[in-house]
Image (cartoon, rainbow, N blue to C red):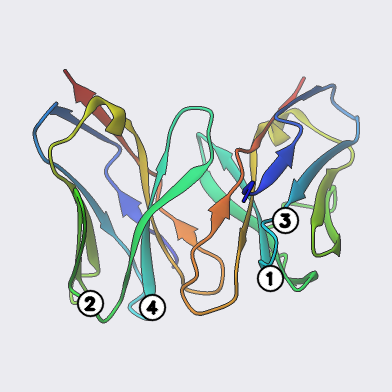
Amino acid sequence: GEDVEQSLFLSVREGDSSVINCTYTDSSSTYLYWYKQEPGAGLQLLTYIFSNMDMKQDQRLTVLLNKKDKHLSLRIADTQTGDSAIYFCAENLRRALTFGSGTRLQVQP
Amino acid sequence: DAGVIQSPRHEVTEMGQEVTLRCKPISGHDYLFWYRQTMMRGLELLIYFNNNVPIDDSGMPEDRFSAKMPNASFSTLKIQPSEPRDSAVYFCASSPSGAGSPLHFGNGTRLTVT
């Protein structure tokens, strides 16, 4: 099947690190993506990783990929209140993307 | 770059009426996608085009839904007749060619069918 799974909710305190996890089903996915959705807005691309990489870092964001376990994670360092949003992981089994259900990140001041 | 532009932002209509959603992709992008987002089903791919040609419409719910892309800068998603269960946020996205090119999303059209 083409299920991408994420936990629904994560709450952290401002300044802490956030880790959002995702599992995907198809090992033939060549790219994996993280998107952010703020209320009333579309999905904004945060970062993506090629499947032959284990890690990618981009400023406060770190993506880890474990192909053996089909597990993807997004770490946000020094989480800010502006990071509160829904985060989606996605895989590209085909040209279009298949998205997870999204993880709502709540950052408490 | 203005990004992907969708119109209208909000649409409220009565059951049985025809609804047309519009999308202008980013210039130079060869792929255009229509997704639907609901609380129950999350983000679902409805259809996507490559160079104005529909490639995969297996996600279109039923014959009431149709999508067209008459040229590289415009696409429509039409629902006729609309039903309350069609209420959702409809997103258009575009991407350039190239393996792994990410999708760029518009801000969506929130459709309410009463």
Q: Which mark is residue B30?
A: 1
Q: Position of residue B44 (x, y in %)?
A: 57, 51
Q: CA distance from mark 2 to mark 4?
A: 10 Å
Q: Which tag, 1 or 3, sits closer to the chain's start? A: 1
Q: Position of residue B56 (x, y in %)?
A: 69, 70
- Nearest to the observer: residue B2 or residue B77: B2
Of the residues shown, which amino acid type is indicated by label 3? Met
Q: Is residue A18 left or right of residue B81?
A: left
Of the residues shown, which amino acid type is indicated by label 4? Thr
For the residues labelled 2 and 1, say whether their Cβ atoms are less than 8 Å apart: no
Q: Is residue A15 left or right of residue B8?
A: left
Let me know if marks 2 and 1 both belong to one chain.
no
**In this view, B80 is above or below B95:** above
The residue sitting at 53% across, 74% down in the picture is A94
Q: Which mark is residue A53?
A: 2
**In this view, A18 is above or below B49:** above
Q: Which mark is residue B60?
A: 3
**Badge 2 sits on which subunit?**
A
Element type at mark 4: loop
For the residues labelled 3 and 2, say whether their Cβ atoms are less than 8 Å apart: no
Which mark lies nearer to you, 2 or 4? 2
Element type at mark 3: loop
Of the residues shown, which amino acid type is indicated by label 1? Asp
Q: Is residue A44 left or right of residue A49?
A: right
Which mark lies nearer to you, 4 or 3? 4
**Badge 3 sits on which subunit?**
B
Of the residues shown, which amino acid type is indicated by label 2? Met
Residue of label 4: A30
Q: Position of residue B80 (x, y in %)?
A: 89, 41
The residue sitting at 53% across, 40% down in the picture is A42
The residue sitting at 20% across, 52% down in the picture is A59
